[in-house]
Amino acid sequence: MERVRQYWIAFLCVVLGFSIVDAYAEEIVLHTVHIPPHIVDASIIPPPADFDSTETIYGLDADILRAAYATQGVSVRIVLTPWKRIMRDVEKGLILGAVSCRPVPSRETFAFFSDYLSDSANTFVTRRGHLDGKIPTLALLKEYDVAAVNGWSQTNILDSADITYVSVTGLVQGINVVLRRNLDVFMTERDSALFAAKSMRGFENLSFYDVVGLDLDHYSVCFSKLYPDAEKWRDVLNKGLDELKKSGKRDEIVKKYGFSSMLQ
């Protein structure tokens, strides 16, 4: 009888043990694109030698996302997918969600938004000291020749302010037209511009001016309203982000990328 009792105790321990392991071995899949420094494809930009990450995708938001979910016993697999397809699949409920996804009104009909992973200011990139002594407002741009990345949010801002601009294909081209051509200001997202410029020749000849009067750009995860348990995974992430912030680990990740945290 004693042996039977011991057998069942051992059996229950094994079953419960597997249940506990399973609870802390859940994996979710989120989709993204290469948008350094928030999300970085290591095959395009390998991580610095002092980074201990061996992930094929890293970056400020990716690292914060993984760390936050890890506090809740959840791992995240991040898959690179074209952005238009990601948004289509989130809207149709074919995938759980997207990172990094700005919480804009046009997405509210089909997505739940997590708390912010990171944020960044809009900035004016110029030749060294070009706007020193001036207040960097949108109105100031009417006096200068301006560039912005085609399709990025800055073009919407410029269009709304009735400011003419030249479209460029990306950060590197935008920085180069300021450094090597006759354009005065490249308006873009600050952290991405800093990240790109630091790897380019001529970084020391640039100045960055945060735009006065514009809100920060916020980056979060958008979860499909049609995908099973989407709200649950949003809430799990939010709980993890809160724990990460309270522990100070979030600030450690931000500092690793050379930025300061602006989230309150």
Image: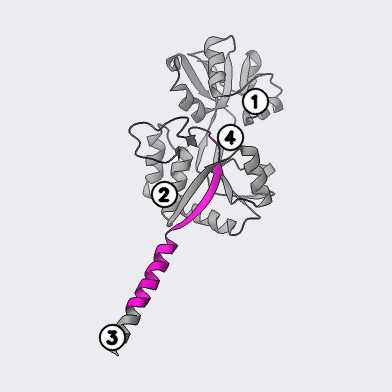
Seen at 71% across and 28% down, the residue is: 160
In the image, residue 211 sits, relative to residue 181, either above or below, namely below
Q: Give the range drawn in magenta.
A: 10-37
State the mark number for residue 3: 3
Please name the amino acid that badge 1 sits on.
Answer: Asn
In percent of width and height, residue 89 lies at: 65, 47
> Mark 3 vs mark 4: which is more N-terminal?
3
Q: Label 4, on which residue? A: 215
Examine the structure image and report whether residue 26 is included in the region drawn in magenta. Answer: yes
The local crowd at label 1, few if under 14, some if 14 to 19, many if 20 or more residues have their Cα within 10 Å, is some
- Is mark 2 in CB contact (under 8 Å) with mark 1? no
Asked whether the residues under the numbered discs 3 and 4 touch, taking CB atoms below 8 Å apart as contact, a structural biologist would say no
First in residue order: circle 2 vs circle 1: 1
Tell me, for residue 150, which label it has, or none: 1
Q: Marks 3 and 1: in contact by CB < 8 Å?
A: no
Q: What residue type is labelled 2?
A: Leu
Front: mark 2 or 3: 3
Q: Residue at x 57, y 20 (%)?
A: 186
Which quadrant of the structure image shows residue 6?
Answer: bottom left
Marks 1/3: CA distance? 74 Å
Of 82 and 140, which appears nearest the observer?
82
Pointer 2 residue: 244
Label 4: how many Cα within 10 Å (few below 14, some 14–19, many 20+): few
Side (left or right) of 207 relative to 147: left
